[in-house]
Amino acid sequence: MKTRALIEFLDGVLKPGEFRDYAPNGLQVEGRENISSIVLGVSASLGLIEAAAAKGADAVLVHHGWFWRGEDARIVGVKGRRIRCLIENGMNLIGYHLPLDAHPEVGNNAELARVLGLSIDTRAGEYGLLHAGEILSGPMTAAEFALRVEKALHRKPLLVGPADKRVHRIGWCSGAAQDELGEAAALGCDLYLSGEIREHTTFEAVELGVPYLAAGHTATEQFGIQALGRLIKATFPELVIEYIPQENPV
C-alpha cells in the first residue's frame, strides 16, 4: 500500500490533531513510497532500526519516535547514526506518542486495563490519560497485585508503600506519569501504577497512603503499539507486521 494511505488511516484512528504533543505525530522520516512490511516497537532506537533493516521492512512504527521538543537539532552522534541507518535502508519512520497513550481501544492505558484485569470507570487529567477502575476479580493486597503486574508485563515492578494494604480501586497512567499520583488519590484510588517514579514521589505515596507501582516505562507502553499493529493487520491483511520487543530496565 502507499505510505500516504497508511498515514491517513493511522491519523484517522489516532486523531493526532487533537493533541499538543512533545514530538511530531505521524510520518517523521519519509522512506519508500510503498509499504508491504512494518516493524513495530516501543522506541525508535538504533537496535530497532537495524533489526527492521535486517528484516527488509519498509516502515518502522513506534510510540517513541524522534525530534522531541527542546532537543539539540543537530543530526550528530546517536541521532545521526539512527537517521543514517533509517535513510540508507529506505525505511519510513512513523510515530504516535500521546495519541497512542490516550486511545480508548488500542491505547497503552486501555491495553493495561485489559492485561491487568481492570475496569475503566474514570478518565481524568490532560487528554484523559489518568485512568481509574476496579480489579475485576476483586480486592487483593498491593503485593498480590504487584505479582499480577509482574506476570503480565514480564518485569518485576517497584512497590513503594505498604505491601499488605488491601486494594481494589486502581489508578494508572503509562510511561512517566509520576505527577498524577495526587489526582489518583483524590479519585479514591487504593493504589497507583505508572512506568517510572521520582525521588519525591516515594514520600508522597507513603504520606498519601497510596502504594505506588513503578512498573517500567517501556513495560507499561509495550501493548498499545501491538494493539495498533493488530488493527492495521485486520484492516490491511496483505501487510506483514512484526513486533520486536526491546529490553529497557527503566
Image (cartoon, rainbow, N blue to C red):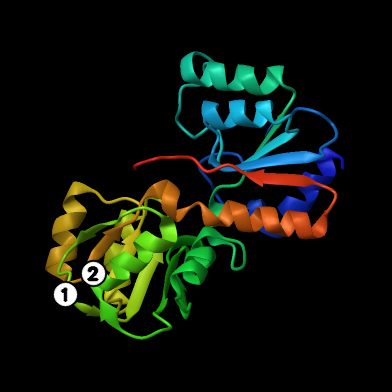
Left or right: where 172 falls relative to 22: left
- Residue at 51% over, 52% down: 222
Give the percent coordinates (x, y) of residue 23. 55, 39
Tag 1 secondary structure:
loop
Q: Nearer the viewer, residue 202 or 17?
A: 202
Left or right: where 87 falls relative to 47: right
- Residue at 85% over, 49% down: 238
Task: Relative to 46, say whether 134 is above or below.
Answer: below
- Residue at 61% over, 54% down: 226
| On-image quarter of the C terminus | top left
Of the numbered discs 1 and 2, the one sitting upstream in the chain is: 2
Left or right: where 219 falls relative to 212: right
Label 2, on which residue?
A: 143
- Residue at 76% over, 55% down: 233
As shown in the figure, which amino acid type bears the numbered disc 1? Answer: Asp
Give the percent coordinates (x, y) of residue 225. 59, 51
Whether the residues at callouts 1 and 2 have beta carbons within 8 Å, the answer is yes
